[in-house]
Image (cartoon, grey):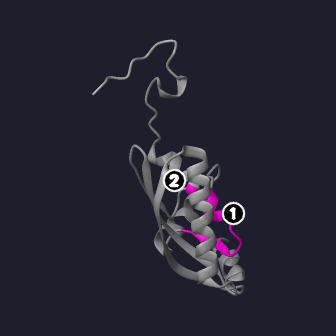
């Protein structure tokens, strides 16, 4: 077996190691999932409730990684998503598009192979829930 030599003739792309943090992949996957029509929100009931409280605090910003969990290796990654789908959208079609968008985004930006995207649909958002959510946030 021959060791790889480095020097001026070695391609710059192999002169070192790159490590991509879990949080980076979580942000990419969360953003890619939210881009799909029919996705109302990411996260389960408790994480969405806690997130809504954090978002209501002045200066608080919505978390891009809410509802996203990843495992990142040297060359591969796996993604777990928890989503809420808008009423009226075909769930199978929405999650298929989410899966495709997440894989494309993560692989394009990180060069990691996405081995799986597991999606848990935790809720369906009904149109009349908008009014309920708006009044819940007001002090009475």
Over which residues does the magenta segment extend? 29-42
> N-terminal of the two: label 2 or label 1?
2
Membership of 39 in magenta stretch: yes
- On screen, 1 above or below 49? above
* Residue annotated with mark 2: 26
Which residue reaches farthest left? Answer: 1
Q: Position of residue 74 (x, y in %)?
A: 39, 43
Q: Nearer the viewer, residue 135 or 90?
A: 90
Q: Residue at x 52, y 61 (%)?
A: 66
Q: Can residue 49 be seen from the camera position used here? A: no
Q: Position of residue 40 (x, y in %)?
A: 65, 73
Res 35 label:
1
Membership of 38 in magenta stretch: yes
Q: Which image quadrant: the C terminus?
A: bottom right
The alpha-carbon separation of the residues under discs 2 and 1 comes to 14 Å
- On screen, 39 above or below 116? below
Q: Which image quadrant: the N terminus?
A: top left
Say left or right for 83 vs 135: left
Which residue reaches farthest top? Answer: 8
* Circle 1: element type: loop
């Amino acid at each position: 077996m021959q060791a790889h030599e480095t020097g001026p003739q070695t391609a710059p792309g192999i002169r070192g190691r790159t490590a991509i943090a879990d949080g980076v992949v979580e942000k990419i996957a969360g953003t890619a999932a939210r881009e799909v029509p029919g996705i109302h929100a990411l996260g389960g009931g408790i994480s969405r409730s806690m997130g809504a409280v954090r978002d209501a605090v002045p200066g608080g910003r919505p978390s891009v990684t809410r509802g996203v969990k990843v495992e990142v290796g040297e060359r591969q990654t796996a993604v777990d998503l928890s989503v809420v789908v808008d009423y009226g959208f075909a769930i199978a079609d929405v999650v298929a598009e989410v899966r495709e968008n997440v894989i494309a985004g993560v692989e394009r930006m990180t060069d990691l192979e996405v081995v799986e995207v597991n999606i848990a649909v935790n809720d369906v958002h009904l149109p009349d829930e908008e009014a309920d959510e708006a009044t819940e946030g007001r002090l009475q």
